[in-house]
Image: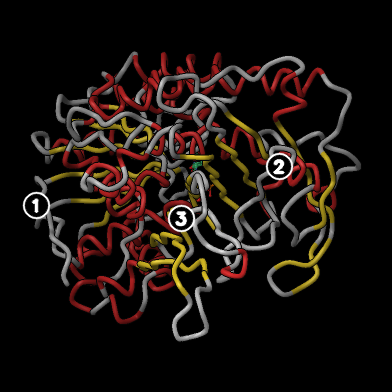
Amino acid sequence: MTSRIIPVDLFDLVVFGATGDLSQRKLLPALFHRDQQGQIPPGSRIIGCSRRALGSEEFTAFARKAIEDHVAADDRPPEVMQRFLARLSYVAADAAQDGGWADLERVLARGADRIRVFYLAVGPDLFGPICERLAASGMVTPRTRVVIEKPLGKSGASARALNETIGRVFAEPQIYRIDQYLGKETVQNLMALRFANALFEPVWNSGHVDHVQITVSETLGVEGRAGYYDTAGALRDMVQNHLLQLLCLVAMEPPVSTDADALRDEKLKVLKSLKPVAGDAVSQLTVRGQYRAGAANGGAVKGYLEELGAAASRTETFVALKADIANWRWSGVPFYLRTGKRLASRVSEIVVTFKPIPHSVFDASAGPIAPNRLVIRLQPDEGVKLWLMIKDPGPGGMRLSHVPLDMSFADAFNVRNPDAYERLIMDVVRGNQALFMRRDEVEAAWDWIDPMLEAWSASADLPKPYTSGTWGPSAAVALIERDGRTWYEDQDL
Ligand SMILES: NC(=O)c1ccc[n+]([C@@H]2O[C@H](COP(=O)([O-])OP(=O)(O)OC[C@H]3O[C@@H](n4cnc5c(N)ncnc54)[C@H](OP(=O)(O)O)[C@@H]3O)[C@@H](O)[C@H]2O)c1
């Protein structure tokens, strides 16, 4: 099966922070793949921009290396590499200085009518200065879009301030707040499962769903990013954005269409229905942890404090929490969320566990009857599993087994699974905001997170230690087991 290519208009894309990690690992490879697939129109340009004094040829060599490092050899035929590199140029400019901006203006003036995208792959402190310079030099045309990356603030107040700053230059329909989880194939598939099948929607509610788990676990530690990470922590870095976005897609009502605002209106309603977790409830409904030395990725690893080079830190590298959605559909159905670094395996998945059957007609000799579960896996291998009870094959009486109907997308469709950034960058060019967070969503998510951050910072408790390579502190297990439930663990991991 081949994937469909949606044509896009001629565009110029300026990557601020073009020499950075995100650009090397994600943006340049993603753009290359789209070019290889024939989606980038002839004449479209990619302009790198950062402080480093590089000539366009040096930047081209830099980009070639990034692609060689991150795109499989079979996927980069020489003619595509040549075509792609010919699109690139570079302008040295400092967000905080005057030099270089007139050069950028001159380059862009040669394509004044094109779609213009400014991708801000730089720290958020530079969003304001860059936007102001773009506006002052008249580079923001009606067909211009701006892309910003997390972190979108550190609290509700700072997110609002950031939104104000960007909003002074760009109108909301021009602003693309990227969350790479929303670009993943399985996230799209969650919508297909829910809204293109008659099977699930009638049971997608508190009458039939027992609880929902959302896990995003990493085996990596903070390594070179310890300085940044210590100012953020898992709640800000992962829950406020990625996990809450996934929760919204599971819990939202059917939108009236797939139009961006129709979808985002429904997600916003979910965020506004989250029961506040504040004051004393924070210690009952949340667990924060910090990894210690242990074993991960096949070897001994250091603890967080050693990586940070500090004697103490109150920053959490793990969080588990129980959320309740106070609305008609989900009342009484807990959503358990957990995320952390240096955990036992790398996985992102949503698990919807259905209620037990009301009565068993089978003898005890048939074995226990486990509940149905729908497991939506975002990584490492995207796919969907539906756990069902079936009869063990063969004679020997009625014995029941819990087995998954397993659909791995890579096997099912035999296509390369495009990286989320490929879809998301092209959505920006197409002007489709459906998979990007709207201002009010970001602010509503912070409004729910802020009281937890406040309670943690007012508490004398430190994050609970956990050994690297485990599933986090034992309190996280207690959080769910107190309710008579357990965290889902896939035997394949
Ligand atoms: N890396 C990821 O996977 C990832 C994932 C999600 C979000 N993000 C976010 O994306 C942004 C970039 O991350 P990164 O990891 O790529 O950071 P990085 O590796 O530190 O790169 C930063 C880039 O910004 C440029 N830069 C720094 N100061 C500048 C200035 N005053 N004017 C113009 N350019 C400047 C740097 O180049 P010069 O030094 O040459 O100027 C470099 O190209 C951050 O906000 C980060 O939180 C990154």
Q: Is residue 449 left or right of residue 57?
A: right
Q: Is residue 28 left or right of residue 211?
A: left
The answer to whether 100 is drawn above or below residue 157 in the figure is below
User: Which amino acid, by three-letter code, is at mark 2?
Assistant: Gly
User: Which amino acid, by three-letter code, is at mark 1?
Assistant: Pro
Disc 2 versus disc 3: nearer the observer: 3
Q: Quadrant of the N terminus?
A: bottom left
Q: CA distance from mark 1 to mark 3?
A: 33 Å
Question: Mark 1: is the Cβ under 8 angstroms from ligand 1?
Answer: no
Disc 2 versus disc 1: nearer the observer: 1
Question: Mark 2: is the Cβ under 8 angstroms from ligand 1?
Answer: no
Q: Residue furthest right?
A: 311
Instruction: First in sequence, mark 2 or 1: give its number.
Output: 1
User: Which amino acid, by three-letter code, is at mark 3?
Assistant: Val
Residue 347 in which image quadrant: bottom right
| Residue indicated by mark 3 | 375
Residue in the foreground of this view, choosing between 279 and 175: 279
Q: CA distance from mark 2 to mark 1?
A: 42 Å
Residue in the foreground of this view, choosing between 5 and 353: 353
Q: Which residue is depicted at the point 37% across and 38% down?
A: 204
Q: Quadrant of the C terminus?
A: bottom right
Disc 1 versus disc 3: nearer the observer: 3
| Residue indicated by mark 1 | 7
Q: Which residue is depicted at the point 53% across and 32% down?
A: 333
Residue in the foreground of this view, choosing between 468 and 374: 374
Residue 453 in which image quadrant: top right
Residue in the foreground of this view, choosing between 137 and 362: 362
Q: CA distance from mark 2 to mark 3?
A: 35 Å
| Residue indicated by mark 2 | 227
